[in-house]
Image: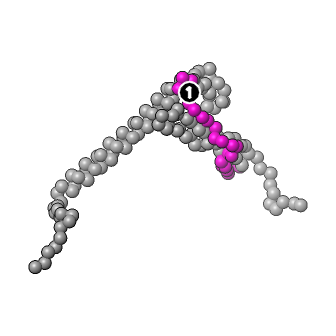
Amino acid sequence: MALYRESPISGSTYRRAFHVIMENSLNKLPKVFYIEEDVVILSNNVITTTAVTGPPLGGVVNANGVIELRDVVTKEPTGQYVPASLVYAALYSDYINRAEARDAAEAALLAQSLTVNTSAEVSVVAPDAAVVEE
């Protein structure tokens, strides 16, 4: 049977991690998981689908371990290693830096809001005040 509007196309496909999940539960060893997706490039179209190959790739992070670095273009090992604890410290630092910046921005907005509201007239009513008619 002939296929309607069939045309030859060329393209490529690859797999990549599109979500990296750090699990940092209290009183447990930290874990990292990589959720993968398949990418198909056909002509000018990019199609992505979540790769379902079983449980997520990853597991417990060995704080005393090392991570072999790879060239991001060729995937070849560079011969360099980085301590896993340094990666953990970098991610922790990124979190704290972002959280403190957010908190400072929120505090500044609150302070600005309080400054604007101090010029407004304020009336206070007791929450259990009852109206008594004589």
Where residue 92 sits, quadrant-wise, is: top left
Indicate the position of residue 10 as horizontal and vertical percent values: 76, 46
Residue at 47 percent of width and 37 percent of height: 26
Image quarter (top left, top right, bottom left or bottom right) of the C terminus: bottom left
Indicate the position of residue 87 as horizontal and vertical percent values: 51, 29
Using the image, determine if residue 77 lies above or below residue 39: above
Q: Determine whether, in the image, residue 24 is placed left or right of residue 2.
A: left
Q: Residue furthest left?
A: 134
Q: Nearer the viewer, residue 1 or 88?
A: 88
Indicate the position of residue 30 as horizontal and vertical percent values: 52, 33
Q: Which residue is mark 1?
A: 62
Which stretch did the figure color magenta?
43-65
Residue at 67 percent of width and 49 percent of height: 49
The question of residue 59 being in magenta is answered with yes
Residue at 64 percent of width and 24 percent of height: 77
Using the image, determine if residue 132 lies above or below residue 102: below
Image quarter (top left, top right, bottom left or bottom right) of the N terminus: bottom right
Q: Determine whether, in the image, residue 120 is placed left or right of residue 42.
A: left
- Whether residue 17 is visible, yes or no, is no
